[in-house]
Amino acid sequence: MKGRRYPTLAEATHIWARIGLLSFGGPAGQIALMHRILVEEQRWLGEKRFLHALNYCMLLPGPEAMQLAVYIGWLMHRTLGGIIAGALFVLPGVVSIMALSWVYALYGNVGPIQALFFGLKAAVLAIVIQAVIRIGSRALRNAAMRAIAATSFIAIFGFAVPFPLIILAAGMIGLFGARAGMPAFLGGGGHGKVGAIQVNDADTLLGEESPAHTQVNRAWAFRVSAVFLILWLTPAALLFAVFGPANIFAQIAAFFSVMAVVTFGGAYAVLAYVAQEAVQNFGWLAPGEMLDGLGMAETTPGPLIMVTQFVGFMGAFRGAGGLSPLVAGTLGGLLTTWVTFTPCFLWIFLGAPFIERLRDNKVLSAALTAITAAIVGVILNLAVWFGLHVIFDEVRTVMSFGLSLDMPVLSSLNGPAAALVLVALIAVLRFRPGPVSVLAGCAAAGLALNFAGIT
C-alpha cells in the first residue's frame, strides 16, 4: 500500500493492547472492533482476507475472536506476532476476572454485593435468551436444522447427554448429509457483514499476495504445533502423575483440556457443558454462581469464555486441601486459563498453512452447519436451566421413564427476580442496547431493590 509504512512488531503490539482493552461485548462485538481497527483504520488487511481468516476460525473449537487475533498477528509478524496478539487479547480479561473472583470469594455474602449479582443474573439470562433467538434465526433455516436443534435440546435437557457427544453426533449427521448431496446440509453460513466499509486487499499493507513466511512447509507447522501441544498437556500430565486423579488441580486440568477440544459454538454453548459438569458432577459451584461468573465475563474485556477462569477459581478455592483457599483459587483460575487458551495457538499454527484447503471443503462446512444447529438447542437448554435457578428459589429433579428433568417448585417463585428478568428481556429484544448497558442497568436495579428492602 503506497504511502504507508509496514508496522514494526512494537507498533503492532500497541494496537493489539488497544484491542485487548476494548474487547467488550462478546465475539460479535470483538470481531467488529478488530474489523474497524485493523481493516478500516490501520488498513493492515482487506475485507476478503479478513473474512477468509474469520471463516477458518469458525471451524475451530474455542473462542473465535481470540483465534482471529492470533491468525492476523501471525499473518503480520510471524509466530511471535500471533503469540503477542493472542496473549494481549486475553490478558485484560485474566486480570479482571481474577480480581473479581477474589472480591466474590471474600465478600460475596455481603448484602450490597449479593444485590449487585442479583441484578446481573437477570441481565445475563436476558442476554442468553437473546443469543438463542439471534443464533437460531441464522442457523435454523430448514426443517433438518430445526430437527437437529430440537433433538439436541431434548438430549441434554431431558437425558443429560454429554455436550461432546451431541457435537460429535451433529457433525457426523452434517458429514453424511453433505456426502449424500442433501440440499439442507449444503447451504452457506457465517457472520454476514462485519463492517460497512469495503476495503480491497490491494489497498492494504498486506496486499493481495500472501506474505513469504506464510508459504511454509508441513514440517514448520508440526514443529510449532508440537511445542504448543507439550505446553498445553504437560501440566495435566504432571498433576495426574504427582497427585493422582482425585486432586482438584488434576481434575481442573483434565476437564478444561477436554473442553478446549469440544467448545464449538462460542461461550454460551460452552457454558452449558461447564454447567453440566462443574455444577452437577463436580459440585465446584452452584447454578446461581455460574450466572454470577458470566456476569463478570460480560462486563470485562476479553473472551466470554473467560468465565471458566472463575469456575476453576471457585473449584480450587473450595477444594484447597492444605493450601490457603485464596492461593488455591488463584492457582486453579490460572491453570484453567492456561489449558483453555493454549490450544487456540495450536489450532492456528497447525492449520494456517492449509487454510485454503479447509475453507473450500464443502463437507467440512456442512458438518459445521449441523453443529451450529445443535448448539442452538444446547444454548436453549442453558437458558431454561439458568431461568429455573434465577426465577425460582427451589428446583427439584424429577425422574420418569428415563428422563431426568429439573422442575421448579412453583411456590418458590421469586417475584422481584422474575420482574427484573422480564424488564431486561423487553429491553434487549425491543430496544437492543449493548450488553454492558443492560448489565449496568440491572445491577443498579438490584442495588435499588436491596436498599428498598425488597430482595
Image: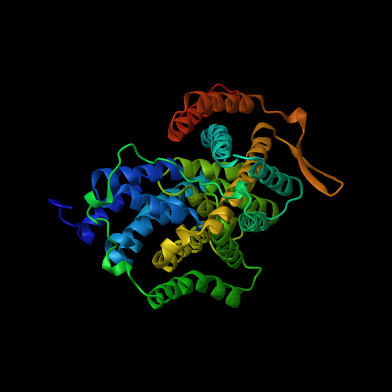
Q: Residue furthest top?
A: 452
Residue 108 seen in render: no
Residue 283, percent from left and from top: 67, 54
Residue 200, percent from left and from top: 27, 47
Q: Residue furthest left?
A: 3
Q: Nearer the viewer, residue 368 or 164?
A: 368
**Measured along the vertical axis of the image, is residue 22 above or below residue 413?**
below
**Measured along the vertical axis of the image, is residue 210 above or below residue 124?**
below
Identified at 57% across, 53% down, the residue is 366
**Measured along the vertical axis of the image, is residue 117 above or below residue 82?**
above
> In the figure, is residue 28 to the left or right of 366?
left
Q: Residue furthest right?
A: 401
Residue 190 seen in render: yes
Q: Nearer the viewer, residue 18 or 299?
A: 18
Residue 300 placement: quadrant: top left
**Number of numbered discs present?**
0
Residue 40 placement: quadrant: top left
Q: Nearer the viewer, residue 446 or 343?
A: 343
Identified at 73% across, 49% down, the residue is 155
